[in-house]
Amino acid sequence: MFFTIIGAGVIVYGIFYTVVTSLLDSDLYLGFLDKFGKSPRKLKGKVVFITGASSGIGEHTAYALAKHGVKLVLAARRQNELQRVKAQCLALSGGQLEDKDVLVLPMDVLDVSSHQMHFDRAVRHFGTLDILVNNAGRSQRAAWEQIDLDVDKQLFDLNVFSVVNLTRIALHYFNTKGEGHVAVVSSLAGVIGAPYSGSYTGAKHAIHGYFNSLRLEKSSNNIHVTLLCPGPVFTNFLQEAFTEKSGQKLHGSTQPTDKRMTAERCGHLNAVALTNKVSEAWIGKFPVVPVTYVSVYFPILTKLTLKLIGTDRLFKLRDSKDPVEIIKGIKKLILQV
């Protein structure tokens, strides 16, 4: 009888969670914090270092923080784009930020030997640093068995090892300071597998392994770890995405009809998660968060569902595109090389 009650409770909870998250664009906890938790204005005056800040999710996370007077280090390779983002941050701040409160830091995260120099420059400029947001990275679209091993290595260098290296530098500083906060823009692909993105999915799972381990190590310290896990978002990520061949870019694009979250909304939810020191945040328009929840907590049900809908439909749910056309496009690129 006892186990029957427990089982019934799990089922009721699962149904409740799935229904509620169907009405939100995030997991239940983050949705609650967005309405009733600490506002990003609580971070006013803090200093946040964001990599990959020249476009996409990094850019819009910077905007969401700038609106509340958060001082920023904007790091990326393209200085002109960083200057554009800086100008917009200052405008959105409504006078809360001055020119010196937003530092443009031209930086290639793949050059790990330069990480310490860039980090030190940011600390010297502001005299302190409170949060590091590792956002720089690239996605991928490719058939698993066709991927060159060099692509796996390049993707891990960018999406994993550059992140780990910069974070370790930040941790040495935070350990001395006695407090700090590190975050990574991961993906829902780091929570569950994603088809036609084997290297990318593997890299995001590696990020979760690294940072979940770090969180446990720092659980008794005043150092916080946040994994930000967005689903499909309107950015230029498909333009720069890896394929199966080294040196290739997908040169894909999103369409207005795609079922994606706006980068602005994603940036806001990232800011909420950072303010409230959330351990892991799932972000995305229906139905990606409920699907992720069911996949994690009801794997047998997920397996049966996949047999019914097929992998191609799952891909279309993720990218609002036909996977066959994506793979054809990749093969066409290869033939042109």
Image: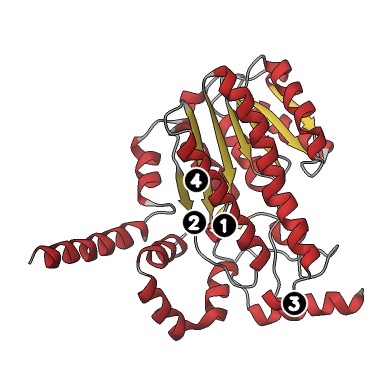
Q: Around disc 4, counting alpha carbons within 10 Å, would you say few (fewer than 14), some (14 to 19), or many (20 or more)?
A: some
User: Residue 50's quadrant in the figure?
Assistant: top right
Q: Which residue is mark 1?
A: 205
The part of the image, by quadrant, that contains residue 290 is bottom left
Report the amino acid beneath label 4: Asn
Kindly report which numbered mark, 3 or 2, lies closer to the viewer in this rendering. 3
Q: Give the Cα separation between the discs numbered 4 and 2.
A: 21 Å
User: Label 2 neighbourhood size at 10 Å, few (<14), some (14-19), many (20+)?
Assistant: many
Of the image marks 2 and 1, the number of the one nearer the N terminus: 1
Can you give x and y, in whole percent of width and height, for residue 183 in the image? 56, 39
Pointer 4 or 3: first along the chain: 3
Looking at the picture, does residue 274 appear above or below residue 155?
A: above
Q: Nearer the viewer, mark 4 or mark 3?
A: 4
Across and down, in percent, residue 326 comes to 70, 76
Q: Can you tell which mark lies on residue 220?
A: none
Circle nearer the N terminus (1, 4): 1
Residue kind at label 1, given as amino acid type: His
| Residue type marked 3 | Gln
Q: Badge 3 is on which residue?
A: 146
Image quadrant holding the N terminus, namely: bottom left
- Residue, disc 4: 212
Q: Which mark is residue 284?
A: 2
Query: Can you say which quadrant of the picture contains the C terminus?
Result: bottom right
For the residues marked 3 and 2, what is the alpha-carbon distance in whole angstroms?
Answer: 29 Å
Q: With respect to residue 55, does 312 lie above or below?
A: below
Q: Earlier in the sequence, mark 1 or mark 3?
A: 3
Which of the two labelled residues, at mark 4 and mark 2, occupies the earlier sequence position? 4
Quadrant of the image occupied by residue 168 = top right
* Alpha carbon separation for disc pair 1 and 3: 20 Å
Tell me what residue is drawn at x 71 percent, y 55 percent: 156
